[in-house]
Every structure is written in structure tokens, then in C-alpha cells.
Amino acid sequence: MKMINKDRGHADAGPNLLPVVNITMVVLIVFMIGASFAGPEHYLVSNVPITESGVGGAPPPADYVPEEPFEILVNPYGDGFEAIAGNIRTTDMAILRAALHQKKEQFQATGKLPPLVISPTGNVHYEFLIGVFEAANEAEFDRVSFASARQ
Amino acid sequence: MRKKRSMPAPTGGVNITSLCDIMLSLLIFFMLVSKRGVNTGADKDMPLPQTVLGISIEDLGNTVTLNVYAGLADEPYVTTLDPATGKQVTLRITEPGGRRPLEEFLTEVRKHNPEVKLILRGAVDLPYRYLEPVLRTAAAAQVSNVNFATGKVEGVATASAG
């Protein structure tokens, strides 16, 4: 007697998962690539973004000696900028970087690293301010801020 | 007659159930950590200054992004994403009646989240006179953590912050 095998076909019963696997894998790869490459931008951080040049508020204690900041004046110069800080006077960002490194070492030798204040005029472009800010960060000045716009 | 139990028919492939499990877990993980589709209100068309240094901010939920543009009469106009409505809003530094919408907005944000980080975005040619009032307003609202958004110079690694 010929038996009909009713069990045949049970082993591969159920939906075919291969398309799901293919699509999931593609989506997974997309997200993995997206996660490995961070966005096209990053951030320069300041915890003291602006420094007041005026006076006000509660009077300081009698023994308080105000810290003299190291000030960089930034002026527009042609299509670029000019930075003036003590004996540094340059229109080149690379020279400014090197000079700030040197200045920081001089300050460190005295054991006192003052706050650095970037003091631009109102017409200086953001691009150059960020360049000076980056140069100060690169020289490892730990307190970098902007002053009110000079006239 | 005793019925013979037949062997299951060969499927001709490997069992992909565990592969599916692992892949779906990975997919869910990467979907959660991915920043795709997160709208911070940043103006993506703004040409940012390029820098080598910089950190990346992982926790964008803890930030407020301000796009600063040159406005009329030396006053900037600032756009941001209103967290309540999810829509882009324009905020002025001062209004004719004396109101200070940007300061009010930042004060409100800081009240709900004292650790809020401010992301400032300005175009390369934005004069400082438009940026300064925004920095002053942030200081008045006691938001001290200010991050200047810059473009990455290609091929340079970036530090990471929480």
C-alpha cells in the first residue's frame, strides 16, 4: 500500500526570511556607516564667552588683586585681519599660532597663566575671530573669552 | 501496518534565525544611536568657518542651537527651534516695547535645564557686532557654556564630549 507522506514539506514551512535579511542588512550597514562618520561640524567651547570691560556689582574684597588679562586686539585688514598682542603684530594665522605658543610658555615660566581676551572691532569677520580663538585654544590658554566690540 | 516516520526534507540552507536576531538587535542599536532625522534647528546652508580643533557633542538633546544673521541697524536676528512647537522661530535681542525675546527664551530654557549648552552658528563673513549682542544676551540669561559651530577641516580627528 502506498502511503501518502503528510509530513513532507513541514521542514521548510514558514515565511521566507531571505528578503527580510537582505533589507535588514542593507539598513544596518547604512546606520553603521552613519554612526561611524560623525557630522560635518564640530564645536569650539568657551565657558566664559564674553568679558565685561566695565565695572559694577559688589565690590571685591580688600586683598583682591585683579588678574591682568592677556589681550589680543583684532582689527580688519584688507580682506583679512590683523592681530596685535603685546609685541605680536601679524596678519597671518600661522604666525599668530606660533607667537601664542611662545607667549604661553613665557607665562608658564612665571607660574601664572592669565585669561586671554580677544578684543575685536565690530567689523571683524567671524571667520577670523574663530581663527584667533582656535589659535588661543591650540596654545592651551585655558580661559579664552571675547571682549565687547571696540569702536 | 506500521507507518514509517519520514525524515524532514532537506532544506538546502543554513538556519538564519540567529543571524536575524543578531542583525535586528544591531539594527535597533544603531537606529537609536544614530542622529539621522534629529532636527536641532541648525541652518545647514550657512557657510561655517573651518577649524582643525573642536569637539563633537554627543548629547544634542541638551543643547540649544542659535543661527545668528546680520539684521538691520546693527542688530542681529537669531533663529532657533522652539522646543514647545518644534518650529523654527526668529528671536530679536530687543523689541521696541523693551522686551528681550532672546533673553526670555534662554532664561526659560535654562530654568528647565541648568546644564544647557548653547550652540552658536554664524556665517564666515558675519561681523562681530552682530555676534556680540548674542553673547551678551547669553551671559545675561546665565548660559555660560557656549559652543561655536565650525566646519571640520578634512582628515582631522575630533574629540568628543557628552
Image (cartoon, rainbow, N blue to C red):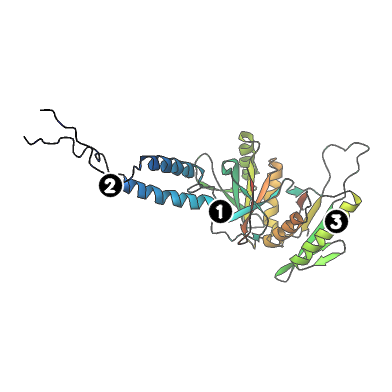
State the CA–CA distance, disc 3 to disc 1: 34 Å
Question: Is residue B46 positioned above or below B113 on the image?
Answer: below
Q: Position of residue B26 (x, y in %)?
A: 46, 43
* Residue ranking furthest to the bottom: A78
State the CA–CA distance, disc 2 to disc 3: 72 Å
- Residue B96 in view, yes or no: no
Which residue has dot 2 on it?
A: B12
Image quadrant containing the N terminus of chain B: top left
Say what secondary structure mark 1 lies in: loop
Q: Chain of mark 1?
A: A
* Residue ranking furthest to the left: A1
Which residue has dot 1 on it?
A: A39
Say what secondary structure mark 2 lies in: loop
Q: Position of residue B17 (x, y in %)?
A: 36, 40
Please identify the quarter of the rendering in which residue A14 is found. Answer: top left
State the CA–CA distance, disc 2 to disc 1: 44 Å
Residue at image point 87% right, 53% down: A107
* Residue ranking furthest to the top: B1
Q: Nearer the viewer, residue B95 or B81?
A: B81
Q: Chain of mark 3?
A: A
Q: Amino acid at mark 2?
A: Gly
Which residue has dot 3 on it?
A: A105
Q: Amino acid at mark 3?
A: Glu
Please identify the quarter of the rendering in which residue A65 is found. Answer: top right
Residue at image point 82% right, 48% down: A54
CB atoms of marks 3 and 1 within 8 Å: no
Q: Nearer the viewer, residue A7 or A80?
A: A7
Q: Nearer the viewer, residue B19 or B98?
A: B19
Q: Is residue B109 left or right of residue A113?
A: left
